[in-house]
Image: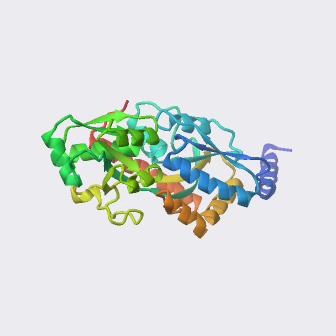
Amino acid sequence: MNSRKWTVLALALALAAAPALAQDYPSKPITLVVPFAAGSGTDGVARIVGHKLAERLKQQVLVDNKAGASAQIGAEYVAKAKPDGYTLFMATNTPFSANPSLFKTLRYDPIKDFTPIVRVGELPFALAVNPKLPVSSTKELLDYARAHPGKISYATPNSTSLVASETIKRQAKVDIVGVPYKSSPQALTDLVGGQLEMYVVDLGSGLTTLKSGKVKTLAVTPARGTKILPGVPPVAQAVPGFDLTSWNGIFGPAGLPRPIVDKVNAEVLAVLAEKEVQEKLANIGFEVWPSKSPAEFAQYVGDQLALWTRLIKDAGIQPE
């Protein structure tokens, strides 16, 4: 048999096997890797979605927190995983949109090493300050920072907090000092305790604290505002043109078979359509906004990479 016939036979076998692959999947527990610490906003989303996904797939979905290095540890782990659908990645704009501009070298490629499956939604952020700081609005915070150069410290546990804070710093022309953190919960604890004066915090990990009065919530980062904190004005009121949020989605390693991609996509979309899931996610500060298809999500990931590249350049942030 010549090589052409072998090729045709191999293709026919592959096409015949595809439906069976999707039908048999999953036959064992799935690991859903989260590149941030337990208690973070992404972790909360992963646990709510993962629990319901497990019910639909009739297999355990185990959340595995591989935090550190600005989500690089988790990203590299998934990039090297076997593309069989049993290692999935619940990730954000940090490893896919921001890290390529925040680091001189990465041990993974945000486009080539992953298979986009489905966008889950957005995680809005809020500008919060320690309650002892004598300010009650973003304008007052900026005026205070100008009157006390170098005296305001802000937390940077993730790319969105970093880029948002640095953008405010540059556009408002204030002298404030960044303090790196490994996790959002620790940064929030230090804001409440007075070790920090300012923190652009994701609503996923900070909503309860923001509503408790333990910190002052001055603004939200999306220019349109957010229905989760309807009475809080956008940062853009004091910093014209400011508009920033974080997105969240599920990926697999590169080479994930299309039948598995389509099955996970369909099941996650079904989960996100449930009113109970939407309410639970809203309660932890997350807005459901799913992509319609894997192709749409892949396009979105590419567009976001271009957007964040520009944001980071404009903010004057130098790669590490």
Residue 303: give x, y in percent of width and height. Answer: 43, 53
Q: Is residue 312 left or right of residue 63?
A: left
Expressed as whole percent of the image width and height from the top left, the position of residue 92 reads: 49, 48
Query: Against 230, is 105 above or below?
Result: above
Q: Nearer the viewer, residue 80 or 34?
A: 34
Q: Residue furthest left?
A: 147
Residue 124 point in image, percent of width and height: 41, 56
Q: Position of residue 251 (x, y in %)?
A: 59, 49
> In which quadrant of the rendered image does the N terminus lie?
top right
Q: Is residue 316 above or below residue 116?
A: above
Q: Quadrant of the C terminus?
A: top left
In this rendering, would 276 be left or right of 152?
right
The residue lying furthest to the right in this view is: 1
Residue sitting at x 70%, y 55% = 54
User: Is residue 303 visible in this depiction of the protein?
Assistant: no
- At 58% from the left and 44% from the top, the residue drawn is 114
